[in-house]
Image: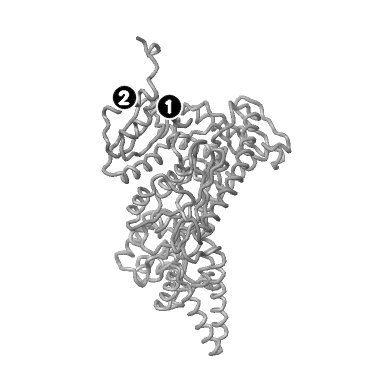
Amino acid sequence: MTQTDQPPARTGHEVIRDYLRTLDGSPGVYRMLDAQSRVLYVGKARNLRARVSSYARPTGHTPRIARMIHETASMMFLTTSTETEALLLEQNLIKHLKPRYNVLLRDDKSFPNILVTAHDFPMIRKHRGAKREKGSYYGPFASAGAVNRTLAQLQRVFQLRNCSDAMFESRTRPCLQYQIKRCTAPCVGKIGPEEYAAQVRDARLYLSGRSTGIQEKLAAEMAAASEAMAYERAAALRDRIKALTQVQTAQGINPRTVTEADIVALHLDQGQACVQVFFIRAGQNWGNRDFYPRVGADVDAAEALEAFLGQFYDTREPPRAVILSHGIENPDLMQAALSQKLGRKVTLSVPQRGEKAELVEAARRNARESLARKMSETATQNKLLKGLAEAFDLAGPPQRIEVYDNSHIQGTNAVGAMIVAGPEGFYKAHYRKFNIKGDDLTPGDDFAMMKEVLSRRFKRLLKEDPDRTQGHWPDLLLIDGGAGQVSAVAEIMREMGVEDIPMVGIAKGVDRDHGKEEFHRIGKPPMALRHNDPVLYFIQRLRDEAHRFAIGAHRARRTRSIAATPLDEVPGVGAARKRALLAHFGSAKAVSRAGLADLKAVEGVSDALAQKVYDFFHERG
């Protein structure tokens, strides 16, 4: 029998029934796969045999589960010691495999915290990601904006430094932060260690929710200063009290009976979902965030909310209490899993009355309103994507558009940028920047830069997802540039064997003005859209977003290069020695020209280190 004569693979409940002979009542995780071995669904079970037998029945399933069973060609199983372990494993697999029939949380971005560093003179700053640096962490906050606003006000109140340790060590005079009363300049001795430590202690107390004593203390100090006719100090203390009050006001509704909790509320409508999370820490509302998990039309609230909780806390530290809008299918199991993750008891509750119920209702209202806005925006976005497909003769509305741009100044600090858009707007978690590495590139050669960016992007795609099953392959490329850039991209795509993705170059046109853009495609003449065409405005927004992202990445790289000096590359020269050398000679260039005897004369620089510095610059020269 030839390959083409082979019978189709068996699928459905009969295939599932065959597995029952080898299964027992152990807890574990199961995977349902289609005929191409793609994972359709990942589930957990207290009793694997009982759970799988429910899928072996030919009837009695919801439409979603019936479709999933019909497509199932094989299954995989992994037994675990406990059901809690099965739940944790299930969430890890869902996050990694992204099965089509699971409820899926698509936003796994970490939340920012405030970090007070472990240092003789600690700094206060925003922190995102793993908590590897030593210090005290406070959060999470709902967004970077919420952290930035709080930090700005806290600096007015507690006047802690926000400069890096390297800058702190190299300062010889106070910076602007001191002049505008946002820092007490410990770097140059304007405040002693004990007094600065008292400011740090007050900041930590405030961030832990104990701000009443701080206000009373500041008020007493202001009264004492006024009594002593130290009116300038009294005015400064008055401003700090006012700033502290503004921080508390800006944080919105602060609950009276909830100290540490996440308020999690779900709203379902027409097969779409929005989950609103309010973050309550230290008795204060530190903002809210909405999420739009992928659900099916027949997914109920209990299943959707349980799946959300498992995936949401998979990479995040849960609070002591999680307050829910709906009950979930396995509350005891979820509570045990979260408690195990935190290392102390976590409670789950669905309040029916009182302040907690009011908080949940506020979160539900936000979820309902956010989903209504999202559905309206999605309808508009789908219409624009359909118009885009018609304008450029695409096979269908693109589901993933990648837009590329470069940014540099005469070829220096060159950065390539990629932004991603689709039916739900901009997918910022998928944005990427590319530091241009080509040593043989002619400075300012935009064609070569674009070729490098696209080459790196698609080489990685070909390596990580050659079968295009993970949803990371674009179905439209927009290139900021004209025929030259499009030709350069097409050449590199041909070399990699990727020629089936349409691409369009966006050129400004003869007057280089919005509304007169020309569009370039391989093998076709340039074209333009009507001046008032909504699709044209949509493309302009995509290009402008790519331009914004590219400029931001370029500026960040340029700032780092400006702050760097050749002394950073000298082995053995740390922040203190760098500060001493710069203070003695005035500049890195003067250090590079100094003689060995002059280097040895610098306070704190040993003869051996002076020799290293001298050799470094003179061997290079």
Q: Earlier in the sequence, mark 2 or mark 1?
A: 2
Question: How many discs mark residues in the rendered view?
Answer: 2
Q: Secondary structure at mark 2?
A: helix
Q: Quadrant of the N terminus?
A: top left
**Which picture quadrant has residue 23?**
top left
Q: Percent position (x, y) of residue 392? A: 63, 29
**Which picture quadrant has residue 210?**
bottom left
Q: Nearer the viewer, mark 2 or mark 1?
A: 1
Q: In whole angstroms, how far apart are the C-alphas of marks 2 and 1?
A: 17 Å
Residues at circles 2 and 1 in contact by the CB criterion of under 8 Å:
no
Q: Give the amino acid type for the residue marked by disc 1 in the picture.
A: Thr
Furthest residue in direction right, as rendered = 531
Q: Percent position (x, y) of residue 235? A: 57, 80
Q: What residue sits 34% from the left and 39% below the top?
A: 45
Furthest residue in direction bottom, as rendered = 228
Q: Nearer the viewer, residue 117 or 596?
A: 117
Residue corresponding to mark 2: 18
Q: Secondary structure at mark 1?
A: loop
Q: Nearer the viewer, residue 543 or 24?
A: 24
Q: Is residue 359 above or below residue 470?
A: below
Which label sits on residue 59?
1
User: Visible in this render: residue 451?
Assistant: no
